[in-house]
Image (cartoon, rainbow, N blue to C red):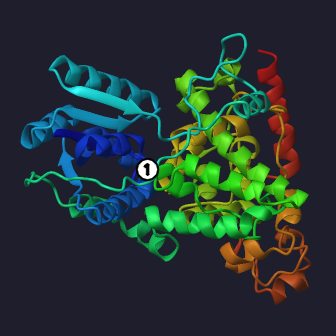
């Protein structure tokens, strides 16, 4: 009987797992995760998602055990580890779902070629995106405008997701494996222990969250997703990033909800949600065609942008001490929970690169470290979009006004009061602009600007003028 290794990598689930589905049809399934040197380096930069990795592996192993399978953990070089398992298990094939990060793609191609050169079978599958990443426009070039990409995608058919295989046969012998706790000792850092208060990684939890959201929140998503305290977020982003849930399964489930709904506003909301799923694909579309977007601006003239910000300002931004309540609330939420509301992500990112003129790569690295839902493609696209140096980011000189954003999307100050508790007693409108509050209001709220809460790190009007001059300078190059 055929024996196939399923190499898991950021696809920690049993449903809609193309590699697993195909292998289960053909014979014995041998699930493997390799804690390679490359994985260690990657997760050393992404500490929050490292925590998610460990708990996703534990959840995956538990799910496999219900089907009579075991997850085998290996260490070291990936090719050597795969070869070791193949020899131990007398396996002749390796199946895996593709990754799309530049280094990972090169490495996967190299390992596949090495295995095939010694007579081993290798099959790869698309399991992480809605569409295969080779969509091109009529000129045979990558799409550079999201609207055009969206319209093209709506003409394509999303492949039907696979169910969990009904029967999976495991190996009938003991194989050498590391305990999952080998990784836990590295993943359990003191600062991220608090994530347990907010999150439970894993496939079944992800499915439960989707079912809850599709029963209610999705009907209001289009009108409420920008309202910071509305609770309209699906909370699925960390699960999608780790592959705890299939984006194709979500797509088809959302389409069913759409078809069962006749109310126009609800349909528009569902459509807004579907568009966000395609936006995620668009990020990978960019990463595949422009692999340097992780570190270099797509608009080449931005390589000479006149950055001016200081390390002291960067530190104040990281810890939420900028004197801008919405920015500070977002950065503190990120540190505490490992996520941040999407509207606030845009505001905090814009503030860093446009108010402080600090290079976007500094923000990319901080988000890489602290986001549970860190995703290379989405992070790179987001920072380039906010900075104005990526594609489809017109007007590139747009500068978010944190005060207006706060007043519009957190009108009662609920979000600010939660994450900046020293301002919690301030009434509207001063919760958005504490330094403008009369002395008596500040006294009643037990606030001293410059003592209990900092003054603005930069003046908004002056920072905006400075940023526009910098963009004019870049535009002329």
Q: Position of residue 235 (x, y in %)?
A: 61, 63
**Point 76% across, 15% down: residue:** 477
Between 98 and 262, which is closer to the camera in this rendering?
A: 262
Q: Is residue 404 left or right of residue 241?
A: right
Against 165, is 219 above or below?
A: below
> Which residue is identified by label 1?
46
Q: For residue 234, which quarter of the picture?
A: bottom right
Q: Position of residue 186 (x, y in %)?
A: 28, 59
**Point 70% across, 51% down: residue:** 255
Against 386, is 173 above or below?
A: below
Q: For residue 327, which quarter of the picture?
A: bottom right
User: Looking at the image, can residue 19 be seen?
Assistant: yes
Between 243 and 309, which is closer to the camera in this rendering?
A: 243
Estimate how packed mark 1 is, as few (under 14), some (14 to 19) or many (20 or more) residues with alpha carbons within 10 Å.
Answer: many
**Point 35% across, 40% down: residue:** 22
Q: Is residue 138 left or right of residue 296?
A: right
User: Looking at the image, can residue 358 be seen?
Assistant: no
Q: Is residue 338 left or right of residue 262?
A: left
Between 101 and 451, which is closer to the camera in this rendering?
A: 101
Q: Position of residue 407 (x, y in %)?
A: 88, 65
**Point 45% across, 27% down: residue:** 102
Against 215, is 172 above or below?
A: above
Where, quadrant-wise, is the N terminus in this rendering?
top left
The residue lying furthest to the top in this view is 139
Q: Position of residue 209 (x, y in %)?
A: 58, 67
């Amino acid at each position: 009987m055929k024996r196939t290794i399923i190499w898991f990598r950021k696809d920690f689930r049993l449903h809609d797992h193309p590699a697993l589905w195909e292998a289960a049809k053909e014979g014995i399934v041998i699930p493997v995760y390799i804690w390679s040197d490359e994985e260690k380096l990657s997760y050393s930069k992404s500490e929050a998602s490292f925590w998610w990795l460990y708990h996703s592996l534990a959840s995956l192993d538990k799910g496999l055990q219900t089907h009579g399978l075991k997850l085998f953990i290996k260490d070291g070089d990936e090719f050597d580890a795969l070869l070791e398992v193949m020899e131990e298990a007398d396996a002749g094939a390796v199946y895996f779902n593709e990754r799309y990060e530049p280094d990972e793609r090169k490495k996967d191609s190299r390992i596949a070629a090495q295995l095939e050169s010694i007579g081993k079978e290798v099959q790869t599958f698309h399991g992480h995106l809605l569409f295969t990443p080779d969509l091109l426009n009529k000129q045979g070039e990558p799409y550079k405008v999201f609207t055009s990409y969206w319209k093209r995608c709506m003409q394509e058919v999303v492949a039907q997701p696979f169910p969990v295989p009904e029967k999976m046969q495991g190996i009938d012998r003991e194989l050498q494996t590391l305990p999952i706790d080998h990784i836990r000792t590295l993943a359990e850092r003191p600062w991220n222990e608090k994530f347990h208060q907010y999150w439970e990684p894993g496939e079944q939890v992800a499915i439960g969250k989707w079912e809850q959201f599709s029963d209610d929140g999705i009907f209001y998503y289009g009108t409420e997703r920008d309202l910071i305290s509305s609770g309209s977020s699906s909370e699925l982003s960390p699960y999608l990033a780790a592959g705890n849930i299939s984006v194709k399964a979500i797509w088809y489930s959302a389409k069913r909800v759409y078809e069962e709904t006749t109310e126009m506003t609800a349909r528009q909301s569902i459509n807004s949600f579907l568009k966000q799923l395609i936006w995620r694909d668009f990020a990978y579309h960019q990463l595949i065609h422009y692999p340097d977007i992780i570190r270099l601006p797509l608009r080449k003239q931005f390589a000479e942008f006149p950055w001016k910000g200081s390390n002291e300002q960067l530190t104040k931004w990281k810890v939420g001490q900028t004197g801008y309540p919405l920015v500070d609330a977002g950065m503190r939420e990120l540190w505490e929970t490992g996520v941040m509301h999407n509207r606030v992500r845009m505001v905090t990112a814009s503030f860093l690169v446009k108010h402080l003129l600090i290079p976007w790569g500094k923000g990319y690295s901080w988000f890489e470290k602290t986001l549970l839902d860190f995703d290379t493609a989405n992070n790179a696209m987001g920072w380039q979009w906010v900075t104005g140096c990526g594609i489809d980011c017109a007007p590139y000189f747009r500068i978010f006004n944190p005060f207006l954003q706060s007043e519009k999307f957190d009108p009662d100050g609920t979000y600010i009061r939660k994450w900046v508790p020293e301002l919690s007693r301030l009434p509207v409108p001063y919760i958005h602009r504490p330094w403008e509050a009369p002395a008596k209001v500040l006294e009643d709220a037990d606030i001293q600007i410059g003592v209990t809460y900092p003054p603005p790190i930069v003046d908004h009007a002056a920072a905006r003028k400075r940023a526009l001059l910098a963009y004019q300078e870049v535009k002329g190059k």
